[in-house]
Image: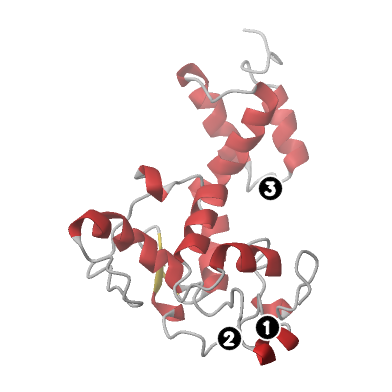
Amino acid sequence: IVLAGGQPLAPERRAGMMTTQWFLAFFTMFATLPRNTASQVYREYLGMDIAKGEGLSPIPNEPRDVDGKNVKQQACAVCHSTLDPLAYAFSTYSGIETSVVEILTNATGTYNAKREPWEAEGYLMGKPTKDLLDWADQARNSDPFKQSIVRMMFRHAMSREVLPHEQQEFEAIWKALPDDKYSINKLLHRLIDTKAFGGRKQ
């Protein structure tokens, strides 16, 4: 196994950082349904933390508890009706494998269509996804992703959150990302030009 540097996943199945061998090994590990992997991506790339009740978008008839983890009980179902559908698209990507054959063939972090049968049953923010590539495509084109990128850069620049009176300029920056072709350089120039940063005077 070639962790922290290996990338055995076929290029046509890659979806950026969330499908590197390290990411899948660290977050999926031995899980049948990779809930932790999905929640980590949802939190870090879309800025929504399910553990804090953020980004909940319940899907009808979920959770089905496909792996027998007793998530149908009322206290769990409120979050898992969003989380489990998020995780279905990740279920065909292997975490840490345990058989000698899989270890020797470097199977950790690879795609296996037969691993689990839920790949095409996923949802992201209430919309169906056919596989993880579709999931990633919808995510990167979403408003939460744009907001998350700009919020991350704002925090680095200002060492704080966006204040209420700065929301209008913050919104203008993230809405400009597609026109700027997601250029961080252009994003930073827009940020420097805001009143929050001190780049413009009234």
- Mark 2 lies on a secondary structure that is loop
Q: Nearer the viewer, mark 2 or mark 1?
A: 1
Residue under label 1, please give it: 107
Q: Are the residues at dot 3 and dot 1 in contact (C-beta closer than 8 Å)?
A: no
Work out which quarter of the rendered image holds the C terminus and state it: top right
- Between 143 and 118, the one lying in front of the other is 118
Instruction: Judge whether 191 appears above or below 184 on screen.
Output: above
Does residue 141 show up? no
Image x and y of residue 144, in percent: 49, 46
Q: Are the residues at dot 2 and dot 1 in contact (C-beta closer than 8 Å)?
A: yes
Image x and y of residue 35, in percent: 45, 64
Residue at image point 71% right, 81% down: 10
Amino acid type at mark 2: Asn
Residue at image point 73% right, 41% down: 184
Q: CA distance from mark 2 to mark 1?
A: 9 Å
> How busy is the neighbourhood of tag 1: few (under 14 within 10 Å), some, or many (20 plus)?
many
> How busy is the neighbourhood of tag 3: few (under 14 within 10 Å), some, or many (20 plus)?
some
Q: Nearer the viewer, mark 3 or mark 1?
A: 1
- Mark 1 lies on a secondary structure that is loop
Image x and y of residue 62, in percent: 26, 68
Residue under label 2, please give it: 112
Answer left or right for 166 relative to 33.
right
Residue at image point 62% right, 63% down: 26
Sequence-wise first label, 2 or 1: 1
Q: Nearer the viewer, mark 3 or mark 2?
A: 2
User: Quadrant location of residue 95?
Assistant: bottom right
Amino acid type at mark 1: Ala
Does residue 51 show up? yes
- Between 119 and 126, the one lying in front of the other is 119
Work out which quarter of the rendered image holds the N terminus and state it: bottom right
Badge number at residue 182: 3
